[in-house]
Image (tube, rainbow, N blue to C red):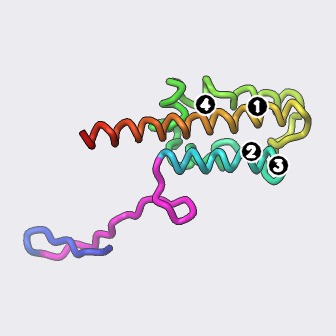
């Protein structure tokens, strides 16, 4: 949607409303962002994907710009930069044991840690859905 902007009766430019980012055609909200994160970890567990950290983390792509602000993971754990999540164990295992730039499942421990991360993301999805349902039931009263 574009509209013309005038100041004191003079045309000064066009304004274009920014559209919200989408995941698979749906407007992004914290639930859909976290569901995308669960799908990412499912792909890693299946051996069809790898972890690129902040470069391909659905929440980081939205909430991480030099600092971690508003991220559902940070809100859930109370800590920024995925501290308090299973990601830290995954990252250091990948770094210390495998020492490769591409983080993916190389061993049974990798798979266990990736499952922990996927399950943690799913736990956040369920928490967000429960909070949304509670908020809607409060509004309906």
* Residue found at x 48% / y 41%: 129
Tell us which disc is closer to us: 3 or 1.
3
Disc sitting over residue 136 in the figure: none
Left or right of 69, for residue 53: right
Check whether the beta carbons of the residues at disc 4 and disc 2 lie within 8 A of each other.
no
Query: How crowded is the residue under tag 3: few (<14 C-alpha within 10 Å), some, or many (20+)?
Result: few
Q: Quadrant of residue 94?
A: top right
| Residue labelled with disc 2 | 51
In the rendered image, the quadrant that contains the C terminus is top left
**Separation of disc 1 and disc 2 at Cα?**
10 Å
CA gap between label 4 and label 3 equals 23 Å
Number of marks in the image? Answer: 4
Q: Name the residue: 42% across, 35% down.
A: 131
Residue 74: horizontal and vertical position, in percent?
A: 52, 31
Look at the image and give the residue range highlighted in magenta. 10-29
- Which of pointers 2 and 3 indicates the residue nearer the eye? 3
The one of 24 and 52 positioned closer to us in this rendering = 24
Residue 118 in the image: above or below residue 35: above
Kindly check if marks 3 and 1 are in contact, taking CB atoms under 8 A apart as contact.
no
* Residue shown at 64% from the left, 33% from the top: 120
Q: Secondary structure at mark 4?
A: loop
26 over 43 or under it: above or below:
below
> Which residue appears farthest toward the left when viewing the image?
8
Residue named by callout 4: 82
Q: Is residue 20 magenta?
A: yes
CA separation in Å, label 4 and label 1: 11 Å
Residue hosting label 1: 90
Which is more N-terminal, label 1 or label 4?
4
* Residue topped by disc 3: 46
Which mark lies nearer to you, 4 or 3?
A: 3
State the residue in front, 127 or 8. Answer: 127
């Amino acid at each position: 949607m574009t509209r013309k902007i005038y100041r004191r009766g003079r045309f000064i430019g066009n304004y274009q409303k920014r559209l919200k980012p989408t995941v698979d055609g749906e407007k992004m909200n914290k639930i859909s962002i976290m569901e995308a994160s669960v799908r990412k970890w499912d792909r890693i567990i299946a051996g069809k994907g790898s972890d690129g950290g902040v470069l391909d983390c659905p929440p980081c792509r939205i909430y991480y710009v030099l600092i971690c602000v508003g991220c559902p993971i940070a809100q859930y754990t109370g800590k920024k930069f995925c501290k308090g999540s299973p990601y830290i164990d995954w990252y250091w295992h990948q770094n210390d044991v495998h020492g490769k730039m591409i983080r993916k499942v190389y061993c049974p421990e990798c798979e266990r840690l990736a499952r922990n991360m996927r399950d943690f993301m799913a736990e956040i999805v369920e928490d967000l859905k429960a909070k949304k349902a509670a908020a809607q039931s409060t509004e309906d009263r």
